[in-house]
Image: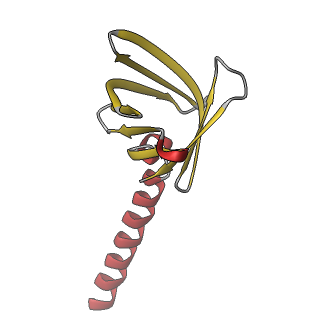
């Protein structure tokens, strides 16, 4: 009986570990956290509630983001110095690298490292 209990416990723990791993690989979970651009010119702090803080040199702005994971599109809305912006990017996340391709400027890529 004790062997069956131990085997069942191992299966439950393994299943939970696999589920956690799969959840962590979803883009909507991978993007959560702080990202700094090349040469630290820009930064993003994505939060689970869909809000984001965007840094531009010495300025910062609060905004919201949405992800279309099926089409790999990240939409960010924010206001900076009284002007509202909506930016749409194609995105990819690999390891600790976030790549954003600006949809307005075809092919212009921005690279961010996880902090």
Residue located 47% across and 45% down the image: 40
Specify how the rendered protein is coloured: secondary structure
75 displayed left or right of 110: left
Tell how many labels: 0
| Between 42 and 51, the one nearer to me in the picture | 42
Residue 65: percent from the left, percent from the top?
A: 40, 26
Q: Which residue corresponds to the image point at 38% horizontal and 9% vertical from the top-left?
A: 83
Q: Residue farthest to the top?
A: 83
> In the image, is 10 to the left or to the right of 22?
left
Tell me which corner region of the image, top left, top right, bottom left or bottom right, holds residue 72. top right
Query: Foreground residue, 50 or 43?
Result: 43
Question: In the displayed image of the protein, which residue is found farthest to the right?
Answer: 107
Name the spot of residue 60 as percent of width and height, x first.
33, 29
Q: Quadrant of the N terminus?
A: bottom left
Q: Quadrant of the C terminus?
A: bottom left
- Which of the 4 image quarters holds residue 43? top left
Residue with the most extreme front position:
58
Q: Could you tell whether 2 is left or right of 88 in the image?
A: left
Residue at (55, 45) in percent of width and height: 38
Seen at 32% across and 9% down, the residue is 82
> Against 28, is 50 above or below?
above
Q: Position of residue 88 (x, y in %)?
A: 55, 21
Whether residue 114 is situated above or below residue 1 in the rendered picture: above
Q: Position of residue 23 (x, y in %)?
A: 43, 51
């Amino acid at each position: 009986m004790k062997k069956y209990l131990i085997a069942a416990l191992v299966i439950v723990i393994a299943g939970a570990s696999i589920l956690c791993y799969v959840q962590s690989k979803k883009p909507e979970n991978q993007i959560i956290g702080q990202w700094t651009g090349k040469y630290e010119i820009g930064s993003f702090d994505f939060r689970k509630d869909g809000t984001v803080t965007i840094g531009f040199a010495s300025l910062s702005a609060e905004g919201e983001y949405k992800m279309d994971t099926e089409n790999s599109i990240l939409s960010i809305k924010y206001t900076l110095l009284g002007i509202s912006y909506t930016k749409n990017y194609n995105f990819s996340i690999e390891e600790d690298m976030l790549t954003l391709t600006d949809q307005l400027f075809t092919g212009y890529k921005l690279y961010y490292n996880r902090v």
